[in-house]
Structures are given as structure tokens and as C-alpha cells.
Amino acid sequence: MNAPPNPLSHALGTWRIVPPGDPQFRTAVWARLQAARDTRWAAYVRQHAAASCAALALAVVAGGWLGQWQAHRQATQDREVLATTYLSEIDARVIADTHAAPHVHH
């Protein structure tokens, strides 16, 4: 059993769009490219103020968070060194062990 041909398929198959030609199209494209190339950094930032502010805010937050994380790591490391040094200075057993052990110089 054959289905009857679909008139929509035939209409879509024969449909062609012919846009009107613009003789200044290529010139206009190159002019826009040149204008974009001549745009200075400050002008670009002003034109894209929302995105620029969002990027700046993200950079400040990320920098602050990373700085806090680094400072916490450093403080923890310093605290461990201070505690070890302090205990080695006041703990009699540690002092006795360091005086009893022979010092070997390499």
C-alpha cells in the first residue's frame, strides 16, 4: 500500500530563498572589524561594564579566599614548629637526649 505524496515535502523541497545582494556588505564587514580592532581596552571595559564588574568581583573573592587559605596553612605550620621548638627547649627528657647523643658532622 503506497501512501499519497505529502505536498508539504514537495513544497519544502522546491523552496529557495534568494536574498537581495548588498554591494556594500564586504566593505561594511571590514569597517566593523577595523573599528573593533581600534577599540581601546578602557572603552571595551566600559562597553561591557556588567561582565567586567563580575570578572573583577570574582577575581577579588577568589584572591581573598586563596589568601585566607594560604595564611591558615602557614599559621598551622608555624604553630607546629613553635610548639616543637618550645617543647624541645623546656622538656628535660628532650634536653637530656640531645646532650647524650653524640653530634656527627657531615
Image (cartoon, grey):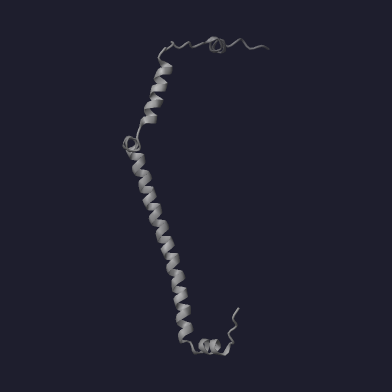
Residue 93: image location, x then y, percent: 52, 89
Residue 31: image location, x then y, percent: 38, 22
How many marks are shown on the rendered structure? 0
- 9 or 42: nearer the viewer: 42
Left of 102 or right of it: where is 64? left
- Quadrant of residue 63 within the rendered picture: bottom left
Left of 45 or right of it: where is 16? right
Q: Quadrant of the C terminus?
A: bottom right
Task: Give the farthest residue toward the front.
Answer: 106
Q: Quadrant of the N terminus?
A: top right
- Tell me which residue sits at (66%, 11%) in the image: 2
Residue 20: image location, x then y, percent: 43, 10
Task: Give the farthest residue toward the right.
Answer: 1
- Tell me which residue sits at (36%, 40%) in the image: 51
Look at the picture and state if 85 lies above or below 38.
Answer: below
- Quadrant of residue 83 within the rendered picture: bottom left
- 18 or 6: nearer the viewer: 18
Residue 64: image location, x then y, percent: 38, 56
Look at the picture and state if 57 lies above or below 1.
Answer: below
- Tell me which residue sits at (46%, 84%) in the image: 89
